[in-house]
Image (tube, rainbow, N blue to C red):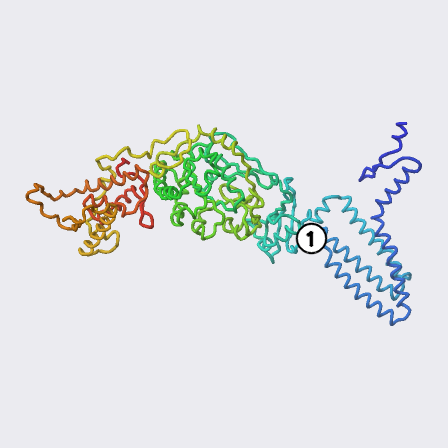
Amino acid sequence: MARRKAATAASVNTGTDMVHVPVGKGGFFGHLVGHMVGKALPYAAPWISAAALPPVAGLATNQMWGGAPLSAGLASAAIAVGGAGLTAVTWKTTPAASKFGQFRRVQATTSVAAGMGWLTCATAAGPFGHPMLDAWLIGGGLFAASWNVRQLLRNGAGGDVESEETGGGMAALAAAIGWEKLTVKNPKGTGKGTVKASIEVAPSTTVDEVQATTAKAAAALKLPPSGVVITKDPEDASKGTISLRVADLLRDGVPFAPPVALGLLPTDDIPLGLYADGEVWAINPFAAAILQHLLVMGVTGAGKSELLRSLIAHLATRRKISVFLVDLAKGRQTVGHIADGIDWLIQDAKEAKRMLRALPAAIKARGSVLADEGLDQWAPASSLNAVVVWIEEAADVADFQELEETARKARSVGIWLCVSLQRATWTNLSTDIRANLQGTMCFGVNEASDAGFCLPDRVTAAGAVPDWGSDRPGYAFSTGMGIPQERWTTEVRSGLTDRQELADLVAAGTPYRDPLDEATATALGQAYAQRAHKGTNRTTPGVGAPAPAAVATTPAALAALPAPATDRSAYALETDTMPDDTELEEAAAMEIQDAYDEVMGSIPADPEPTADYASLRLEDEVPDADEDSGMEFDAPAPIGTEEARHILYTELDGWVQSGRLEFEPADLIPATTAAGRKRPWMQGELKSLVEAGILQRDGHGAYSILHSPLQPA
């Protein structure tokens, strides 16, 4: 029974397909014949058309108009004109984007022209007389055979001809969106959701014009707006590359890539996620030929914080690197679980300004160290750490001039400046600063034009525009920092992080994190020594500690300074004018009066308003002592220059000990008065302290204390 059932079916190999047909009463041969007929029918169609249509159409037109010479002539002329028009339409509408397509156009046009020409003659002469019958038999046979050859090449020769004919779908796309002057060559699928092909434009067009149509191409292919990217060939303006992202391999998220080892150097690759084709997205800013500062941009929810956590987790497991992070909005919320890996976490605006004001001194000191080490720029062989300064919403932290100076000078000394904000418009970030931020990470933006504030023009022109807002968190385009230029137009997605995993990773990296080098820590001064947050590095640097107490001697660095100028010359340095004696006296009197009013205002009212001394003022002459009182008044001895300086330095040192590092000149008036000096002398002393690197003056007349003047340098 089983054999009988097995014998009821058999397989027939036709050369192209394995066809299963039932075997029974006539079943095998019946299905075999049916299959052969089905295979042969497409090849028979041209023969049937050639055999039936011409004689039928010729007989019909001859019977209608061939009876009279006039009607036959007019009908033949009309058919000839119509045939010419039909031939032209055939030529124009037949695609010919490849060599095989060009052959098809010629074949179709010739067939139409020959058929209409025969019909024109057959209308007057009849279809069955000589030579019309001969032309029909010979021409019709050649017509049918030529179309059979084309079908055999297309179906039998397989994918090569089809690929050449359609360009892997590219030629059809070109016809659909008007790329008539574009040649697409060698389309290849990467097997990772991307199709790439070479393109070449005709002399009458440019690759820029083709780049402007990427949105139309994406719509025609039903791809995301950023799914079509066209890049130029840097060596040939007529050539380029088109990339079609036909599948999103990153849709389900990208896992965080942990370090390959603990204790790596800053110059090792930092993996942050994946490209759209599945390759690893990694940056290496410190190993690049030029350290490129970073601009990170994207709307809220676009994935900037996730990227920051990934980066810090990697840096916190490395040697010879220190991280300074400024985030006034949500610092602990974003990086609180990995804060131990951050050497200086700043969440206070005043402390952020201290750090930025101290950076120029650190840059100068690091430059001197690198010069002594014979290095043109920072390298792992240096005694200095690489330093990462990450600033969230920089416009809220520093003025443009201050930040631009840091961006311009920090590159060669191994300080990597990273600025993150939502929109890098000129109101939030000056064009001078943006020009120095050559590395970019542009996450989702709300408007396509916003991407131009971050990404280079050649990237956005290619169609790499992340105008998806916060709909695709983690997706971005990235340039610079050691990334190959051909990768700049490929989408990336940063890895998804787990808070506990990152916290454990940072804790494991504690034995490998080097403390900030002594030269940089010393140059940063009290701003660094008194920082509110201190990361858990391998050791604690023994530099920058506050002075234990005010000492009686003047540090050598200050003692070597020239003595301040006279009151008149010092005043001239501050005001650029030379006042006369009367003006100096009036100014000093006003300052003393202000100080007097401030002090006296805090004293309670005189309990004896009717006393004889109630009407006396501080400026009045001291009354003569009562002869019977036994009291004597002596004029105070004048205070020397060194002692006067020490009074001023002691005041500054006391502020340092209490954590106060900013002041205005008016705050020193009591100490200046106690030193027996006037404001011009104080201004001269402040100028000398700025030149010595003890103080730093900002653009608004205020000062920051970098070091205590009583602490040995």
Q: Does residue 658 appear to the left or right of 498 in the view shown?
A: left
Q: How many marks?
A: 1
10 Å crowding of disc 1: few (<14), some (14-19), many (20+): many
Q: Residue 586 versus residue 35: which sits nearer the camera? A: 586
The quarter of the picture where the C terminus appears is top left
Residue 471 in the image, given as x and y percentages of width and height: 58, 46
The correct choice, above or below, for 214 with respect to 543 in the image is: below
Which residue is outermost to the right? 25
Q: Residue 173 versus residue 67: which sits nearer the camera? A: 173
The correct choice, above or below, for 590 with respect to 504 in the image is: below
Q: Does residue 614 appear to the left or right of 78 in the view shown?
A: left
Residue 683 can be seen in this image: no
Q: Does residue 597 appear to the left or right of 632 in the view shown?
A: right
Residue 166 in the image, given as x and y percentages of width and height: 70, 49
Q: Does residue 339 appear to the left or right of 550 in the view shown?
A: right
Q: Identify the residue under disc 1.
A: 97
Which of the 4 image quadrants contains residue 661? top left
Residue 369 can be seen in this image: yes
| Helix, strand or loop under label 1 | loop
Which of the 4 image quadrants contains residue 706? top left
Q: Residue 315 versus residue 599: which sits nearer the camera? A: 599
The quarter of the picture where the N terminus appears is top right
Residue 504 in the image, given as x and y percentages of width and height: 50, 30
The correct choice, above or below, for 54 with respect to 398 in the image is: below
Residue 357 in the image, given as x and y percentages of width and height: 36, 44
Q: Residue 261 versus residue 49: which sits nearer the camera? A: 261
Which residue is outermost to the bottom? 70
Amino acid bearing label 1: Ala
Which residue is depicted at the point 64% across and 55% down? 181
